Image: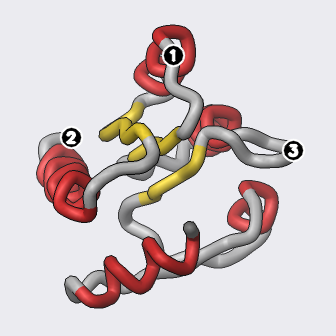
Amino acid sequence: MRTSVARLLEAFGFGTETFESAEAFLGASSNACCLLVDINLDKMNGIELALNLGGRGIKYPIIFMTGRDSDSVRRQALNAGAAGYLNKPFLARTLLEEIVKAFAGAGKS
């Protein structure tokens, strides 16, 4: 999934960086301006990553994606500052629309 989404975004002119885990992202130097994060990660889940970043004062527009949607998970993502929320599988067009909205929202802060 990670490789497929990166290739899709690159085909539309977006620069991408991929990471094996939330911990790998936290330990790296990144030029990211928007994050696409799976909620269901191994050790630290996507919501915990967002809260960790927020606790450090680091703000990114974050689009969460999940294959295990529920009202509870959606509420947690929104409370963690979600700029977007996608249920897998999703259409490429839907992802691109969420990215455009995330970038537009990032300019309003």
Which label number is shown at residue 85?
Answer: none
Q: Amino acid at mark 2?
A: Ser
Q: Position of residue 103 (x, y in %)?
A: 20, 57
Residue at left offset 65%, top offset 77%: 29
Image quadrant assignment for residue 24: bottom right
Image quadrant assignment for residue 54: top right
Q: Which residue is mark 3?
A: 43
Q: Position of residue 97 (x, y in %)?
A: 15, 54
Q: Amino acid at mark 1?
A: Ser
Tell me if 32 is positioned left or right of 94 in this view: right
Q: Which residue is mark 2?
A: 109
Separation of disc 1 and disc 2 at Cα?
A: 29 Å
Q: Which residue is mark 1?
A: 70
Mark 1 and mark 2 residues within 8 Å of each other at the beta carbon: no
**Quarter the C terminus occupies:** top left
- Which callout, 1 or 2, points to the residue nearer the camera? 1
Tell me if 28 is positioned left or right of 69 in this view: right
Mark 1 / mark 2, whichever is N-terminal: 1
- Which callout, 3 or 1, points to the residue nearer the camera? 1
Q: Label 1 neighbourhood size at 10 Å, few (<14), some (14-19), many (20+)?
A: few
Task: Give the secondary structure at mark 1.
Answer: loop
Asked if residue 69 shows in the view, the reply is yes
